[in-house]
Image (tube, helix red, strand yellow):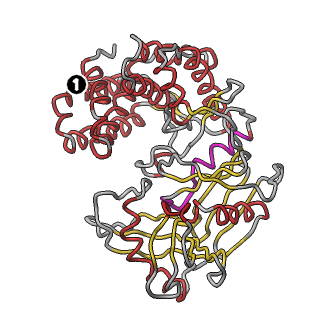
Amino acid sequence: MTEAVTPSSSSTLDSLAPLLRAWLPRQRWFAGKGRPVTGFTPVSVTRLLPAGGGLGLYHVLLRVHQPPDSAHPGDCYQLLIGAREALPPRLAPALIGHVTHGPLAGRTVYDALYDRRPAEVLLEALRTGARVGGLRFERDPRQEIRPHLVARPLAAEQSNSSVVYGDTFVLKLFRRVVPGVNPDLELPLALAREGCPRVPAPTAWFRAELAGRAYVLAVLQPFVSGAADGWELALRELAKGEDFTAEARALGRATAEVHTALARALPTVTLGPAQLGPLVDGMTGRLAAAAQAVPVLRPYEAGLRSAYTALAELAAGGRTWTAQRIHGDLHLGQCLRAPSGDWSLIDFEGEPARPPAERRLPQPTERDVAGMLRSFDYAARSASSPPPGWAHDCRAAYCSGYAEVSGRDPRTDPVLLRAFETDKAVYEVVYEARHRPDWLPVPLSAVRRLAASDPH
């Protein structure tokens, strides 16, 4: 199959290019901040609603080119672009710009995912299993999708965008897309087959088949109505000076349930010296690059590296570990507590900055545990006056809850846990230095602790 770009669609995109060049870098989900956009290559432009009516709607996959790596093909982004004669005030935040030439001349274009009617077009396509150009809309036939559910966008955006339909479903649309299997669909489907209740089972999804490659573009899942985001819940309890250990323990149990189900559903592997070598090398390389990029990290580099060498020494001595598929980016913001008190884990895409193939590699479960331990520390340091020992108590309760289900307390492997927690803290330092410099003291506090700690 060839890429779905016709002369007319290419002309449409050419007319949008100047507007997109200014608009894209301002979006929170755009990964190439700080570098100019030098050009675009269309992957596909699919018309979902004709432009001749009051509303035109285009689904666009677009490669964005930026320096300095001219050999890189460019990141591919997914856009849903609406075209109207005039934009109502409620859609002003979604404005892309006014088109002056080409097929859409005289129209105003905008991010249509935040407009009810275009969002409902996507749901109807999922409900009916539509095929439009290279787009394939698919669903689980065992789950019902009622028509005419009212759409509303979720305000909290990260690296993707979400729309809620009638408090029944939530559609997660991936902004930066790559060909191949997406773990945010793969793992929830595997967990659904295992009957794991801790992860909402995918109801529908859509993908693109272009030039012999498949791209997963969005996943529709049940919406946990009335659920509290774990991060927001923790901050609320901190603000009131309330204990959070019962929730942390329950969250530890939920995490272990998910890990146990993933180990049943998908293959596990044994990590020995040969397998640990690349893992340790990756950690060491990320630390070196981070110290180069963020000079304030350099005084702690040797101490942090000792966490990785201690792990390598254990492996050289014959120690082995079990690795399996995991969440890959676990923190409080990836967890929802339902009004019933039950916890769910969401967003299995993994860390967006890591290559897709790396996100799908089996890993020790301690990597997820380390991410959650760091999240408790983040929450405590975000509060103006946290209760003494709040993060320490939550970390202990979480590990205890995990052990109640898995039969193994993550704290019994301190060398492995320290290595993963160190790797996460180094990642956080780079992220905060680039995006939120005011937050840099939070991971630096952990860096000082981890650089000085004895793993044995």
Q: Which residues are magenta?
A: 176-192
| Displayed quadrant of residue 14 | bottom left
Residue holding disc 1: 303
Point out the image quarter for the C terminus: top left
State whether residue 320 appears in this view. no
Image spot of residue 446 (x, y percent):
31, 24
- Front in this rendered view, residue 306 or 16: 16
| In this view, 303 is above or below 88 | above
In the image, farthest residue toward the front: 89
Q: Can residue 446 be seen here?
A: yes
Residue 76 vertical position relative to residue 106 in the rendered view, above or below = above
Quick check: 72 above or below 11? Answer: above
Query: In the rendered view, does 255 fall on the left or right side of 373?
Result: right
Left or right, 307 with respect to 411, comes to left
Side of 373 relative to 185 (left or right): left
In the image, 70 versus 99, the foreground residue is 99
For residue 92, above or below residue 280: below
- Total marks shown come to 1
Give the residue drawn at x 55%, y 86%: 6
Q: Nearer the viewer, residue 126 or 214?
A: 126
Quarter location, residue 370? top left
Based on the picture, tell me whether residue 203 belongs to the magenta stretch: no
Callout 1, which amino acid? Gly
Percent of width and height locating residue 294 = 21, 41
Disc 1 secondary structure class: helix
Residue 421 falls in image quadrant: top left
Residue drawn at point x = 48 percent, y = 59 percent: 176
Residue at left offset 35%, top offset 25%:
311
Binning the other alpha carbons within 10 Å of mark 1 as few (below 14), some (14 to 19) or many (20 upward) gives some
